[in-house]
Amino acid sequence: MQDKYHVLAILLIAALLAAILAGKMDSAESALIEQTLEAIRNCMSRSPAPWPDEWKRKYLETIRSAVESHHDAPHYAVRLEILRKGFQSCWEGLTKTKDRPLFEVYRCRMRWYVEHLMGTEFPSEDERWKLRDQFTDIWDHAASSLLEQFPFLDPNAVQAAKAEDLSLCYRKLDAPLMPVYLRPMSEEQVGRIKQRWDKLRYARVDLLRRLSGDSTMPSESRYAQSSNAERDYQLAKESLSQLLGLVWMVVPQRPDYYLAAMENQTRALKRRVKVKRQAWSDQQRLQKTRSRQLLQTEHIGFLLAALLETPQCLEGVPSVITQEQNPLEQQDKTAKGGGAYEVGNLLPEK
Protein backbone atom coordinates (compact mmCIF):
# COMPACT_ATOMS: atom_id res chain seq x y z
CA MET A 1 0.00 0.00 0.00
CA GLN A 2 2.79 2.38 0.86
CA ASP A 3 4.46 1.62 -2.46
CA LYS A 4 1.22 2.50 -4.18
CA TYR A 5 1.03 5.85 -2.40
CA HIS A 6 4.68 6.44 -3.18
CA VAL A 7 4.09 5.93 -6.88
CA LEU A 8 1.07 8.25 -6.81
CA ALA A 9 3.12 10.90 -5.05
CA ILE A 10 5.83 10.66 -7.68
CA LEU A 11 3.26 10.97 -10.46
CA LEU A 12 1.67 13.97 -8.78
CA ILE A 13 5.00 15.71 -8.34
CA ALA A 14 5.89 15.01 -11.97
CA ALA A 15 2.56 16.43 -13.12
CA LEU A 16 3.07 19.55 -11.02
CA LEU A 17 6.59 20.03 -12.36
CA ALA A 18 5.33 19.55 -15.90
CA ALA A 19 2.57 22.11 -15.32
CA ILE A 20 5.05 24.57 -13.88
CA LEU A 21 7.44 24.06 -16.76
CA ALA A 22 4.58 24.33 -19.25
CA GLY A 23 3.47 27.58 -17.63
CA LYS A 24 6.96 28.95 -17.86
CA MET A 25 7.22 27.85 -21.49
CA ASP A 26 3.87 29.42 -22.31
CA SER A 27 4.92 32.62 -20.60
CA ALA A 28 8.22 32.75 -22.48
CA GLU A 29 6.49 31.91 -25.75
CA SER A 30 3.89 34.65 -25.24
CA ALA A 31 6.61 37.16 -24.44
CA LEU A 32 8.47 36.20 -27.61
CA ILE A 33 5.31 36.60 -29.70
CA GLU A 34 4.61 40.02 -28.20
CA GLN A 35 8.18 41.16 -28.87
CA THR A 36 7.86 40.08 -32.51
CA LEU A 37 4.51 41.81 -32.94
CA GLU A 38 5.84 44.96 -31.29
CA ALA A 39 8.73 45.07 -33.78
CA ILE A 40 6.23 44.66 -36.63
CA ARG A 41 4.00 47.37 -35.17
CA ASN A 42 6.95 49.77 -34.97
CA CYS A 43 7.87 49.03 -38.57
CA MET A 44 4.31 49.79 -39.70
CA SER A 45 4.20 53.05 -37.71
CA ARG A 46 7.28 54.34 -39.55
CA SER A 47 5.46 54.13 -42.86
CA PRO A 48 4.98 57.54 -44.52
CA ALA A 49 1.45 56.64 -45.60
CA PRO A 50 -0.01 54.26 -42.99
CA TRP A 51 -3.25 52.41 -43.40
CA PRO A 52 -6.26 53.28 -41.25
CA ASP A 53 -5.94 52.04 -37.68
CA GLU A 54 -8.67 49.46 -38.19
CA TRP A 55 -6.79 47.93 -41.11
CA LYS A 56 -3.48 47.88 -39.22
CA ARG A 57 -5.12 46.10 -36.28
CA LYS A 58 -6.66 43.53 -38.59
CA TYR A 59 -3.31 43.02 -40.32
CA LEU A 60 -1.55 42.45 -36.99
CA GLU A 61 -4.25 40.08 -35.77
CA THR A 62 -3.84 38.03 -38.93
CA ILE A 63 -0.12 37.67 -38.19
CA ARG A 64 -0.77 36.85 -34.52
CA SER A 65 -3.33 34.17 -35.40
CA ALA A 66 -0.97 32.51 -37.91
CA VAL A 67 1.90 32.55 -35.39
CA GLU A 68 -0.09 31.21 -32.45
CA SER A 69 -1.67 28.41 -34.48
CA HIS A 70 1.80 26.92 -35.08
CA HIS A 71 3.20 27.22 -31.55
CA ASP A 72 4.27 23.55 -31.62
CA ALA A 73 6.51 24.04 -34.68
CA PRO A 74 10.20 23.20 -34.19
CA HIS A 75 12.67 26.09 -34.28
CA TYR A 76 9.82 28.30 -33.10
CA ALA A 77 12.04 31.10 -31.80
CA VAL A 78 14.13 31.06 -35.00
CA ARG A 79 11.02 31.29 -37.15
CA LEU A 80 9.77 34.29 -35.18
CA GLU A 81 13.15 35.94 -35.62
CA ILE A 82 12.88 35.39 -39.38
CA LEU A 83 9.43 36.96 -39.31
CA ARG A 84 10.73 39.99 -37.42
CA LYS A 85 13.71 40.50 -39.73
CA GLY A 86 11.92 39.72 -42.97
CA PHE A 87 8.81 41.81 -42.36
CA GLN A 88 10.44 45.13 -43.21
CA SER A 89 11.27 44.19 -46.79
CA CYS A 90 7.72 42.92 -47.30
CA TRP A 91 6.21 46.04 -45.77
CA GLU A 92 8.33 48.40 -47.85
CA GLY A 93 7.21 46.63 -51.00
CA LEU A 94 3.52 47.27 -50.33
CA THR A 95 1.58 50.02 -52.05
CA LYS A 96 -0.20 51.90 -49.29
CA THR A 97 -3.79 52.20 -50.41
CA LYS A 98 -7.34 53.05 -49.37
CA ASP A 99 -8.68 50.34 -51.67
CA ARG A 100 -10.19 47.68 -49.40
CA PRO A 101 -9.98 44.74 -51.89
CA LEU A 102 -6.27 45.46 -52.44
CA PHE A 103 -5.71 45.59 -48.68
CA GLU A 104 -7.36 42.18 -48.35
CA VAL A 105 -4.93 40.83 -50.95
CA TYR A 106 -2.01 42.15 -48.88
CA ARG A 107 -3.48 40.73 -45.67
CA CYS A 108 -4.09 37.26 -47.13
CA ARG A 109 -0.64 37.26 -48.71
CA MET A 110 1.01 37.97 -45.36
CA ARG A 111 -1.08 35.23 -43.80
CA TRP A 112 0.24 32.86 -46.50
CA TYR A 113 3.84 33.94 -45.87
CA VAL A 114 3.61 33.46 -42.09
CA GLU A 115 1.75 30.15 -42.28
CA HIS A 116 4.27 28.84 -44.80
CA LEU A 117 7.16 30.01 -42.62
CA MET A 118 5.73 28.50 -39.44
CA GLY A 119 4.35 25.30 -40.96
CA THR A 120 6.87 24.15 -43.56
CA GLU A 121 9.89 21.99 -42.86
CA PHE A 122 12.72 24.16 -41.62
CA PRO A 123 15.80 24.03 -43.91
CA SER A 124 19.15 22.88 -42.72
CA GLU A 125 22.25 25.00 -43.11
CA ASP A 126 23.34 22.94 -46.12
CA GLU A 127 19.94 23.45 -47.77
CA ARG A 128 20.11 27.20 -47.21
CA TRP A 129 23.52 27.35 -48.88
CA LYS A 130 22.19 25.20 -51.71
CA LEU A 131 19.39 27.69 -52.34
CA ARG A 132 21.91 30.52 -52.25
CA ASP A 133 24.01 28.73 -54.87
CA GLN A 134 20.91 28.18 -57.00
CA PHE A 135 20.10 31.90 -57.01
CA THR A 136 23.71 32.68 -57.91
CA ASP A 137 23.64 30.14 -60.74
CA ILE A 138 20.39 31.54 -62.18
CA TRP A 139 21.64 35.14 -62.11
CA ASP A 140 25.01 34.14 -63.59
CA HIS A 141 23.22 32.40 -66.45
CA ALA A 142 21.04 35.46 -67.07
CA ALA A 143 24.00 37.88 -67.09
CA SER A 144 25.98 35.65 -69.46
CA SER A 145 23.06 35.33 -71.87
CA LEU A 146 22.65 39.12 -71.87
CA LEU A 147 26.26 39.56 -72.97
CA GLU A 148 25.82 36.86 -75.62
CA GLN A 149 22.64 38.45 -76.96
CA PHE A 150 24.05 42.00 -76.92
CA PRO A 151 27.85 41.74 -77.34
CA PHE A 152 28.25 45.53 -77.30
CA LEU A 153 27.09 45.80 -73.66
CA ASP A 154 29.58 46.97 -71.09
CA PRO A 155 30.43 43.84 -69.01
CA ASN A 156 31.10 45.99 -65.94
CA ALA A 157 27.62 47.53 -66.13
CA VAL A 158 26.01 44.08 -66.44
CA GLN A 159 28.03 42.71 -63.53
CA ALA A 160 27.11 45.73 -61.38
CA ALA A 161 23.40 45.18 -62.03
CA LYS A 162 23.74 41.46 -61.28
CA ALA A 163 25.64 42.11 -58.03
CA GLU A 164 22.99 44.57 -56.84
CA ASP A 165 20.19 42.13 -57.56
CA LEU A 166 21.95 39.22 -55.88
CA SER A 167 22.78 41.34 -52.83
CA LEU A 168 19.06 41.95 -52.31
CA CYS A 169 18.33 38.25 -52.79
CA TYR A 170 21.01 37.27 -50.26
CA ARG A 171 19.49 39.58 -47.63
CA LYS A 172 16.12 37.93 -48.12
CA LEU A 173 17.70 34.49 -47.98
CA ASP A 174 19.06 35.37 -44.54
CA ALA A 175 15.50 36.15 -43.38
CA PRO A 176 13.40 33.89 -45.65
CA LEU A 177 9.91 35.08 -44.84
CA MET A 178 8.77 34.76 -48.47
CA PRO A 179 8.25 31.16 -49.66
CA VAL A 180 10.75 31.42 -52.55
CA TYR A 181 13.61 32.12 -50.12
CA LEU A 182 12.95 29.32 -47.64
CA ARG A 183 13.42 25.98 -49.39
CA PRO A 184 15.87 24.96 -52.14
CA MET A 185 14.51 24.22 -55.60
CA SER A 186 14.83 21.06 -57.60
CA GLU A 187 17.17 20.92 -60.58
CA GLU A 188 14.13 20.63 -62.83
CA GLN A 189 12.72 23.88 -61.45
CA VAL A 190 16.04 25.66 -61.94
CA GLY A 191 16.13 24.41 -65.53
CA ARG A 192 12.59 25.69 -66.20
CA ILE A 193 13.53 29.12 -64.87
CA LYS A 194 16.51 29.32 -67.25
CA GLN A 195 14.41 28.15 -70.21
CA ARG A 196 11.75 30.76 -69.56
CA TRP A 197 14.44 33.41 -69.26
CA ASP A 198 15.86 32.44 -72.66
CA LYS A 199 12.40 32.76 -74.23
CA LEU A 200 12.23 36.41 -73.14
CA ARG A 201 15.00 37.47 -75.54
CA TYR A 202 12.60 39.35 -77.81
CA ALA A 203 11.20 41.25 -74.85
CA ARG A 204 14.75 42.37 -74.10
CA VAL A 205 15.12 43.60 -77.69
CA ASP A 206 12.02 45.75 -77.18
CA LEU A 207 13.48 47.00 -73.93
CA LEU A 208 16.71 47.98 -75.69
CA ARG A 209 14.80 49.87 -78.36
CA ARG A 210 12.88 51.77 -75.71
CA LEU A 211 16.01 52.67 -73.75
CA SER A 212 17.79 53.71 -76.96
CA GLY A 213 14.87 55.89 -78.04
CA ASP A 214 14.56 53.99 -81.32
CA SER A 215 11.06 52.89 -82.29
CA THR A 216 12.22 51.00 -85.40
CA MET A 217 13.39 47.42 -85.37
CA PRO A 218 17.20 47.52 -85.29
CA SER A 219 19.26 45.14 -87.39
CA GLU A 220 22.09 42.98 -86.05
CA SER A 221 24.71 45.37 -87.47
CA ARG A 222 23.19 48.28 -85.59
CA TYR A 223 23.81 46.50 -82.30
CA ALA A 224 27.55 46.97 -82.81
CA GLN A 225 27.41 50.54 -81.55
CA SER A 226 29.57 52.23 -79.00
CA SER A 227 28.87 51.25 -75.41
CA ASN A 228 26.69 53.41 -73.22
CA ALA A 229 27.34 52.47 -69.58
CA GLU A 230 24.20 54.06 -68.16
CA ARG A 231 21.95 52.51 -70.80
CA ASP A 232 23.71 49.14 -70.45
CA TYR A 233 23.22 49.15 -66.69
CA GLN A 234 19.54 50.05 -67.05
CA LEU A 235 19.00 47.32 -69.63
CA ALA A 236 20.68 44.72 -67.42
CA LYS A 237 18.83 45.93 -64.32
CA GLU A 238 15.36 45.82 -65.88
CA SER A 239 16.08 42.52 -67.61
CA LEU A 240 17.33 40.80 -64.44
CA SER A 241 14.31 42.09 -62.51
CA GLN A 242 12.22 39.60 -64.53
CA LEU A 243 14.02 36.68 -62.88
CA LEU A 244 12.18 36.90 -59.56
CA GLY A 245 8.86 36.58 -61.38
CA LEU A 246 10.15 33.39 -62.97
CA VAL A 247 11.31 32.09 -59.58
CA TRP A 248 7.89 32.78 -58.08
CA MET A 249 6.36 30.51 -60.72
CA VAL A 250 7.90 27.47 -58.97
CA VAL A 251 6.74 28.25 -55.40
CA PRO A 252 4.20 26.01 -53.63
CA GLN A 253 0.56 26.24 -54.62
CA ARG A 254 -1.04 29.44 -53.39
CA PRO A 255 -3.74 28.90 -50.76
CA ASP A 256 -7.40 29.25 -51.65
CA TYR A 257 -8.03 32.25 -49.41
CA TYR A 258 -5.28 34.20 -51.18
CA LEU A 259 -6.60 33.27 -54.62
CA ALA A 260 -10.12 34.29 -53.54
CA ALA A 261 -8.83 37.69 -52.38
CA MET A 262 -7.08 38.20 -55.71
CA GLU A 263 -10.22 37.28 -57.65
CA ASN A 264 -12.26 39.71 -55.56
CA GLN A 265 -9.75 42.48 -56.23
CA THR A 266 -9.79 41.69 -59.96
CA ARG A 267 -13.59 41.97 -60.01
CA ALA A 268 -13.37 45.29 -58.19
CA LEU A 269 -10.90 46.58 -60.76
CA LYS A 270 -13.16 45.48 -63.61
CA ARG A 271 -16.13 47.24 -62.02
CA ARG A 272 -14.06 50.38 -61.56
CA VAL A 273 -12.93 50.32 -65.19
CA LYS A 274 -16.51 49.73 -66.34
CA VAL A 275 -17.77 52.69 -64.31
CA LYS A 276 -15.04 54.94 -65.71
CA ARG A 277 -15.80 53.88 -69.26
CA GLN A 278 -19.50 54.48 -68.73
CA ALA A 279 -18.80 57.92 -67.25
CA TRP A 280 -16.56 58.76 -70.19
CA SER A 281 -19.23 57.59 -72.65
CA ASP A 282 -21.89 59.66 -70.86
CA GLN A 283 -19.63 62.69 -70.94
CA GLN A 284 -18.98 62.28 -74.67
CA ARG A 285 -22.70 61.91 -75.37
CA LEU A 286 -23.48 64.94 -73.22
CA GLN A 287 -20.86 66.99 -75.02
CA LYS A 288 -22.38 66.06 -78.40
CA THR A 289 -25.86 66.93 -77.15
CA ARG A 290 -24.68 70.26 -75.77
CA SER A 291 -22.79 70.96 -78.99
CA ARG A 292 -25.97 70.49 -81.03
CA GLN A 293 -27.93 72.62 -78.58
CA LEU A 294 -25.30 75.34 -78.74
CA LEU A 295 -25.40 75.32 -82.55
CA GLN A 296 -29.19 75.58 -82.52
CA THR A 297 -29.00 78.44 -80.03
CA GLU A 298 -26.55 80.29 -82.25
CA HIS A 299 -28.84 79.87 -85.27
CA ILE A 300 -31.82 81.17 -83.32
CA GLY A 301 -29.71 84.11 -82.10
CA PHE A 302 -28.75 85.01 -85.65
CA LEU A 303 -32.41 84.88 -86.73
CA LEU A 304 -33.53 87.09 -83.85
CA ALA A 305 -30.77 89.59 -84.58
CA ALA A 306 -31.81 89.72 -88.23
CA LEU A 307 -35.44 90.30 -87.28
CA LEU A 308 -34.49 93.13 -84.94
CA GLU A 309 -32.34 94.89 -87.54
CA THR A 310 -34.87 94.64 -90.39
CA PRO A 311 -37.11 97.62 -89.29
CA GLN A 312 -34.08 99.86 -88.86
CA CYS A 313 -32.97 99.09 -92.38
CA LEU A 314 -36.43 99.83 -93.77
CA GLU A 315 -36.57 103.27 -92.09
CA GLY A 316 -33.46 104.45 -93.96
CA VAL A 317 -34.81 103.63 -97.52
CA PRO A 318 -35.56 106.82 -99.63
CA SER A 319 -39.22 107.48 -100.57
CA VAL A 320 -40.51 107.01 -104.11
CA ILE A 321 -40.11 110.14 -106.31
CA THR A 322 -43.39 111.31 -107.80
CA GLN A 323 -43.85 112.84 -111.16
CA GLU A 324 -44.41 116.35 -109.72
CA GLN A 325 -41.07 116.34 -108.04
CA ASN A 326 -38.87 116.12 -111.13
CA PRO A 327 -35.29 116.51 -110.02
CA LEU A 328 -34.51 118.44 -113.22
CA GLU A 329 -36.76 121.22 -112.10
CA GLN A 330 -35.09 121.43 -108.74
CA GLN A 331 -31.54 121.50 -110.03
CA ASP A 332 -29.19 123.25 -107.72
CA LYS A 333 -28.10 126.56 -109.15
CA THR A 334 -24.74 126.22 -107.60
CA ALA A 335 -24.08 123.22 -109.83
CA LYS A 336 -22.02 123.55 -113.01
CA GLY A 337 -23.26 126.57 -115.02
CA GLY A 338 -25.37 127.80 -112.16
CA GLY A 339 -27.87 130.36 -113.56
CA ALA A 340 -25.59 131.62 -116.31
CA TYR A 341 -27.71 130.11 -119.00
CA GLU A 342 -31.03 131.36 -117.69
CA VAL A 343 -32.94 133.72 -120.07
CA GLY A 344 -34.20 136.55 -117.99
CA ASN A 345 -36.14 139.73 -118.73
CA LEU A 346 -33.35 142.19 -119.58
CA LEU A 347 -35.67 145.17 -120.25
CA PRO A 348 -35.91 147.56 -117.39
CA GLU A 349 -39.25 147.94 -115.88
CA LYS A 350 -41.19 150.97 -116.84
Image (spheres, rainbow, N blue to C red):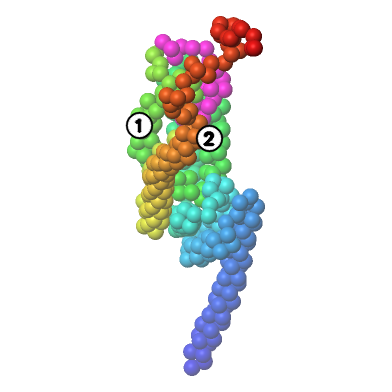
Whether the magenta-drawn stretch holds residue 276 is answered as: no
At which x and y percent is residue 91? 56, 50
Amino acid on which the number 1 mark rests in the picture = Gln
The residue beneath circle 2 is 166
Say whether residue 204 is visible: no
The residue beneath circle 1 is 195
On screen, residue 106 versus residue 28, left or right, reads left
Q: Residue at x 54, y 46 (%)?
A: 93
Query: What crowding class fits label 1: few (fewer than 14 Cα within 10 Å), some (14-19), or many (20 or more)?
Result: few
Per the image, label 1 sits on a secondary structure element best described as helix
- Magenta stretch: give its range: 221-239
Rendered image: mark on residue 181:
none
The rendered magenta stretch, by its main secondary structure, is classed as: helix
32 versus 241 height, above or below: below
Say whether residue 45 is visible: yes
Question: Viewer-proximal residue, 276 or 72?
Answer: 276
Figure quadrant of the C terminus? top right
